[in-house]
């Protein structure tokens, strides 16, 4: 099965794995969202292709993709209220592309793929997020989508997978692609991103990074809590080692580490500096690292 066929069957709820999903669009028609990776700025998955990097977020509910169907971190910065996209783009420039120019900022995205651990998203009131019925359905939907996620990884055989947030990491743990759970490895997040290497059924090796989700709530609450003086020192040291540290240094001035939001963004940057180095290296070896990110 191709990526196109896989995503088409998942979107329509006709994939075998969608049969028992509580958020199957054939059974749940209100406030349902579905998003796919951008073929303009990311890897063109409409044809047989391998990705260099893949990012797995949580679900598309309540975000720009719920309106556009597009998971692209670059396209979605056009929506000024999409904090996940805005913050993710700032991190990409400072840690991955090391550039803020109109062309250079999207460097390495042409070999990148965006997806979610839960393919459909249901927008509900925040007051309902602790509702037991919702929680059960959410977990059931995540479990049903695990195999859809696994198929995407197998078909694209990325060299690097970036897992953002506890929900996405749980799917990778259940699939056996990482061997330690979020609640354990997050204890070291003040010092470093979590990383594992594994082998796909295809025999291809993949490096998996686990970090915080880039949403405003995750940054302001979860990520900010792990920021320490050691984080600050490690961050400065990593930036000194960059061949072009200007954008990262500008990032530090923008987020000086005083408010919870600023501290959380600094933790993300600490994690993404390692991820970015790996993405650049993998593109040099396997992709087209000399392009400017445009098709």
Image (cartoon, grey):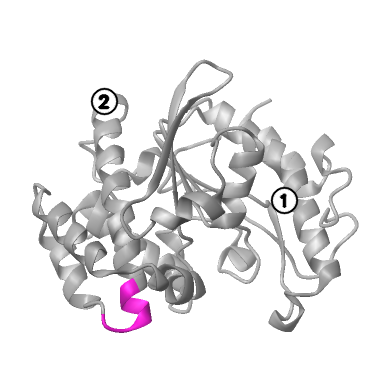
Which mark is drawn over residue 142? 1
Residue 129: quadrant of the picture: bottom right
On screen, residue 263 versus residue 51, left or right, reads left
Label 1: which secondary element: helix
Q: CA distance from mark 2 to mark 1?
A: 34 Å
Q: Residue under circle 2? A: 285
Let me know if residue 172 is in the magenta part: no
Q: How many marks?
A: 2
The answer to whether any part of residue 174 appears in the image is yes
Residue plotted at (41% across, 30% down)? 159
Residue plotted at (58% across, 69% down)? 63
In the rendered image, residue 30, in percent from the top left (x then y), is placed at 82, 69
Let me know if residue 262 is in the magenta part: yes
Is 190 in front, or is 200?
190
- Quadrant (top left/top right/bottom left/bottom right) for the N terminus: top right
Residue plotted at (56% across, 33% down)? 177
Which mark is drawn over residue 117? none
The answer to whether any part of residue 116 appears in the image is no
Label 2: which secondary element: helix
On screen, residue 216 versus residue 125, left or right, reads left
Magenta stretch bounds: 258-263
Is 253 in front, or is 97?
253
In the rendered image, residue 2, in percent from the top left (x then y), is placed at 64, 28
Q: Residues within 10 Å of mark 2 (few under 14, many from 20)?
A: few
Closer to the N terminus: mark 2 or mark 1?
Answer: 1
Residue plotted at (65% across, 35% down)? 175
């Amino acid at each position: 099965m191709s990526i196109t066929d896989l995503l088409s069957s998942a979107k329509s709820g006709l994939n075998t794995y969608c049969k028992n999903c509580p958020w199957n669009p054939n059974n749940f028609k209100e406030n349902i969202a579905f998003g796919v990776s951008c073929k303009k700025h990311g890897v063109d998955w409409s044809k047989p292709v391998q990705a260099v990097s893949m990012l797995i977020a949580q679900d598309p509910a309540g975000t720009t993709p719920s309106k556009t169907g597009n998971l692209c971190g670059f396209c979605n910065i056009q929506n000024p209220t999409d904090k996940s996209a805005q913050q993710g783009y700032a991190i990409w420039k400072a840690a991955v592309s090391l550039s803020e120019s109109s062309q250079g900022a999207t460097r390495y995205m042409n070999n990148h793929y965006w997806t979610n651990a839960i393919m459909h998203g249901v927008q509900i009131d925040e007051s309902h997020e602790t509702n037991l019925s919702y929680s059960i359905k959410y977990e059931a939907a995540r479990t049903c989508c695990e195999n859809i996620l696994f198929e995407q990884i197998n078909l694209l055989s990325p060299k690097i997978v970036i897992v953002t947030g506890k929900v996405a990491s749980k799917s990778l743990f259940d699939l056996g692609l990482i061997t330690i759970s979020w609640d354990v490895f997050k204890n070291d997040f003040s010092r470093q991103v979590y990383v594992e290497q594994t082998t796909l059924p295809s025999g291809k090796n993949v490096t998996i990074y686990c970090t915080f989700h880039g949403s405003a709530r995750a940054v302001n609450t979860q990520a900010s809590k792990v920021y320490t003086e050691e984080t600050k020192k490690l961050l400065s040291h990593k930036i000194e080692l960059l061949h072009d540290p200007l954008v990262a240094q500008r990032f530090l001035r923008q987020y000086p580490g005083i408010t919870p939001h600023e501290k959380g963004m600094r933790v993300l940057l600490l994690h993404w500096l390692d991820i970015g180095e790996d993405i650049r290296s993998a593109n040099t070896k396997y992709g087209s690292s000399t392009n400017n990110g445009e098709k």
